[in-house]
Amino acid sequence: MTINQLQAPGSLLQKMNLEKRETLFGWSLILPAVIIIAALILYPIFYNVYLSFFDVKIMQENIYLGFQNHENIITDSAFWKSVLTSVIYVFFTTMGTAVVGLLVALVMNQEFPLRGVVRGLILLPYVAPVISVVFSWQFIFDPVNGLFMHIAYDKLHLFAERFNLIRSPQTSIIIAVLFGIWKNFPFTYLMLLARLQAIDRGLYEAAEIDGCSSWNKFWYITFPEIYFLLGSIILLRAIWNFNKFEEVYLLTENVKVLPVYTYIKAFTGIMDIGQGAAIALIQFILLIGFILIYVKRVLKW
């Protein structure tokens, strides 16, 4: 028997002990994050699912209802109206932020004087406090003192009378969508601009030598380079817009997207936290379904 054969079992044991210590060390590093995620994300989700099966009483014991809360929500026409409102809001705000963000990123990727200053100013809507910009928009569209009516009614005579676009049921969704695009497009712009700056400039120079037009350079060089990033941004923005509450709720009372409808159902008037939890659960299921379809069909994961 050789010396290496005699030492092999000891070496194997040392290797196993090292791997075990590395595994324990790795778990010790991620355990705090796992605990925080479980406490702040997983527990509220499961507790919300639990509450959706009860008639929740603040000062008394909860009453088990089974699927009655879910049935009441599904048969409520106001719920389906809020679903339609959410779909309209999410689609136009998401696509609007993607298109505007892409166009602005393409422009900001070009050389021109004071480009750095302009790049910084574009981020202001995204970083500004929501409450302050909401009040600014409400003042702009005020029917008496607002800038919009002063120009559209007094100067251009586009309307027969003054009215409030934000509080009008017919136009409030349009204002909410425009506000969502204006407030959130800088995020898309910033992410796309970072990717555009990483594209090899030699590809565009070669395309120019071959006589390619600006559209061909965008379609065959720029778009393939940003496709996955743009698709991921659209997915993130759709998720965020689907759960958007504060911007819509503060801006107008007539755009009852699902988060606003959930708040009204659960915490205003005759509070029904059980039904609010049921709406949140249904909203979560709808969102998960959209994510799975989008990831498979668009991102092709």
Image (spheres, helix red, strand yellow):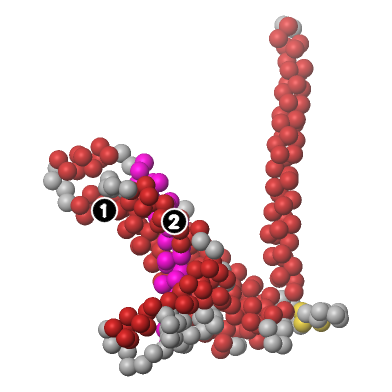
| Residue 191 visible in the displayed image | yes
- Measured from the top left, where is residue 132 in percent x and y? 53, 68
Q: Which residues are magenta?
A: 170-198
Residue at 73% of width from left, 17% of height from top? Answer: 11
In the picture of the structure, the residue carrying the numbered disc 1 is 219
Residue at 46% of width from left, 74% of height from top? Answer: 137
**171 or 287: nearer the viewer:** 171
Disc 1 packing (10 Å; few <14; some 14–19; many ≥20): few
Disc 2 packing (10 Å; few <14; some 14–19; many ≥20): some
Q: Secondary structure at mark 1?
A: helix
The disc at residue 47 is none
Q: CA distance from mark 1 to mark 2?
A: 27 Å
- Quadrant of the image occupied by residue 148: bottom left
Please, which residue is most extreme toward the bottom here?
A: 160
**235 or 20: nearer the viewer:** 235
Judge whether 172 appears above or below 15 on screen.
below
**Which of pointers 1 and 2 lies earlier in the amino acid sequence?**
2
In the picture of the structure, the residue carrying the numbered disc 2 is 123
Residue at 54% of width from left, 82% of height from top? Answer: 253
Name the residue type under label 2: Leu
| Residue 242 visible in the displayed image | no
Overall secondary structure of the magenta section: helix
